[in-house]
Amino acid sequence: MSQINPYLNFQGNCREVMTFYKECLGGELAMQTVEGSPIELECPSSMKDQILHASLMNDSIMIMGSDMIGPDGYIFGNNMALSLSCCTEEEINTFFAKLSVGGKIIHPLRVEFWGAVFGVFTDKFGIRWMLNYDKNQKQ
């Protein structure tokens, strides 16, 4: 089955963000620094500790990130959100509680007209999350 996996770019704090997400969501976190990578010699030495690529995997959740900036520079937009479909009501409550710490709740968790528990917040790093648990989904 096809799925969309978010890829997030940061300004030097990818390690901090991805570690926080691992603490909240669990799973396996892999991070490759610029140092020791195939592009190490192409980058300034000041970038050696920057994250070239990170991936967090927990069952069907996969989030990827990097400190590498494209040719246009770093542009933080508000047009990106991570949509996380949860498997149980306990899971949505746990993820919402942990990920929203230090952030701003935009739409508290509640049952919506489509029959799902849904909530929206911006986490302490400025990333917008939309969490959804369809109470009628087949387990």
Image (cartoon, rainbow, N blue to C red):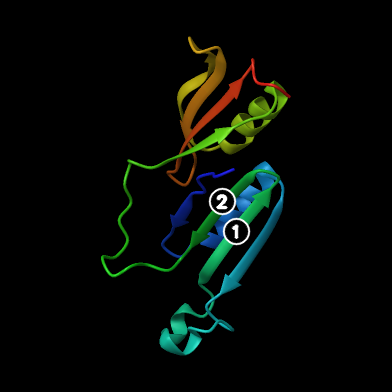
Residue 84 on image: x %, y %: 56, 35
Q: Describe the element under mark 2 as helix, strand or loop.
A: strand
**Can you name the residue that lies furthest to the top here?**
113
The amino acid marked with disc number 1 is Ser
**Can you name the residue that lies furthest to the front here?**
1
* C-alpha distance separating marks 1 and 2: 6 Å
Q: Describe the element under mark 1 as helix, strand or loop.
A: strand
**Can you name the residue that lies furthest to the bottom here?**
41
**Residue tagged by mark 2?**
63
Residue 133 on image: x %, y %: 60, 23
Q: Is residue 51 above or below residue 6?
A: below
Quadrant placement of the C terminus: top right
Going 37% across and 67% down the picture, which residue do you hit? 69
**Can you name the residue that lies furthest to the left here?**
72
**Residue tagged by mark 1?**
55
Nearest to the observer: residue 9 or residue 102:
9
